[in-house]
Image (spheres, rainbow, N blue to C red):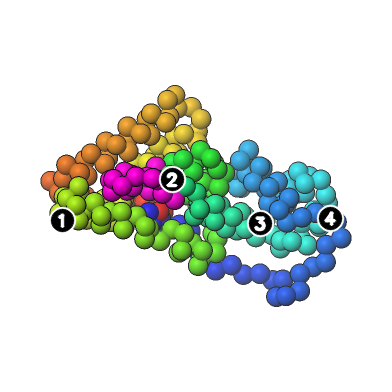
């Protein structure tokens, strides 16, 4: 499913091919893990280089051997999360085209549970910096979801004339809402709620409900979905 997210070219003041020499013994991976843990506890705007250094157990200057800024650390975290999402349970063992289409959205929900910090960074937290543009385009292009939609359309599972972009937005809004509620940790039976919500949205699509209603005017939620479509 194609999700449009924050996009910006990363710029670095470090001379290409000449990284600063690190004598602290602190690894890039250790820094990223510390930043991820702090982000999960307090959010992007509350994480500082000093707090990351304390979490790692080093002095702040040691971080700059690997990253030029806090933003650079979080860009690397977004890229790591995108790669995790790209390979996260991409398909299911089913010949049912509707089940395959449903999975493209359900895996999004499952990813939110398996990797909540990365999910929030990529799909929820607009304050955090963007990742690599080429990686964003590849991972969130939605090509596979469009193929699954076309298979359902060709078999008549989804009514002819259904707008693929509209269908994807409706299904994404349904599962995104359930995923974000699940992140808050205060939703009893959140898996059941996510299942019911997605199934109701799919049932509406398959019954032709979107064809029976006038095209809605763009709203803040639909505009947001358009920016972050899987």
Q: Quadrant of the N terminus?
A: bottom left
| Residue drawn at (64%, 46%) of the image | 36
Among the 4 quarters of the image, the one containing residue 192: top left
Q: Secondary structure at mark 1?
A: loop
* Residue labelled with disc 1: 161
| Residue drawn at (63%, 38%) of the image | 41
Upstream in sequence: badge 2 or badge 1? 2
Q: Residues within 10 Å of mark 2 (few under 14, many from 20)?
A: many
Asked whether, in this view, residue 3 is left or right of residue 127, the answer is left
Q: Nearer the viewer, mark 2 or mark 3?
A: 2
Residue placed furthest toward the left: 212
Q: Gap between marks 2 and 3, in whole Å?
A: 24 Å
Among the 4 quarters of the image, the one containing residue 23: bottom right
**Residue 177: x and y, percent?**
39, 39
Upstream in sequence: badge 1 or badge 3? 3
Mark carried by residue 73: 3
Q: Gap between marks 1 and 4, in whole Å?
A: 60 Å
Q: Gap between marks 2 and 1, in whole Å?
A: 26 Å
Does 98 lie within the magenta span? yes
| Residues tagged 2 and 1 counted as in contact (Cβ below 8 A) | no
Upstream in sequence: badge 1 or badge 4? 4
Asked whether, in this view, residue 99 is left or right of residue 85, the answer is left
Residue stretch rendered in magenta on the structure: 90-106
Q: Secondary structure at mark 2?
A: helix
Mark carried by residue 108: 2
Q: Gap between marks 1 and 3, in whole Å?
A: 45 Å
| Residues tagged 3 and 4 counted as in contact (Cβ below 8 A) | no
| Residues tagged 1 and 4 counted as in contact (Cβ below 8 A) | no
| Residue drawn at (81%, 57%) of the image | 62
């Amino acid at each position: 499913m194609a999700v449009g997210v924050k996009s910006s070219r990363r710029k670095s003041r470090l001379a290409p091919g000449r990284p600063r020499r690190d004598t602290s013994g602190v690894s890039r991976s250790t820094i990223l893990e510390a930043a991820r843990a702090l982000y999960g506890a307090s959010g992007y705007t509350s994480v500082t280089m000093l707090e990351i250094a304390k979490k790692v157990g080093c002095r702040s200057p040691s971080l700059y051997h690997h990253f030029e800024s806090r933003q650079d650390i979080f860009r690397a975290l977004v890229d790591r999360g995108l790669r995790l999402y790209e390979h996260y349970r991409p398909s299911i063992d089913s010949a049912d085209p509707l089940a395959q289409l449903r999975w493209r959205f359900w895996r999004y929900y499952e990813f939110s549970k398996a990797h909540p910090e990365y999910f929030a960074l990529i799909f929820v937290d607009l304050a955090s910096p963007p990742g690599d543009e080429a990686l964003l385009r590849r991972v969130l292009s939605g090509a596979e979801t469009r193929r699954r939609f076309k298979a359902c359309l060709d078999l008549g599972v989804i009514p002819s004339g259904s707008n693929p972009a509209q269908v994807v937005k409706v299904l994404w809004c349904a599962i995104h809402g359930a995923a974000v509620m699940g992140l808050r940790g205060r939703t009893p039976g959140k898996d059941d709620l996510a299942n019911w919500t997605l199934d109701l949205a799919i049932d509406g699509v398959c019954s032709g409900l979107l064809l029976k209603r006038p095209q809605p005017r763009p709203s803040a939620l639909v505009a947001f979905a358009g920016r972050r479509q899987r």
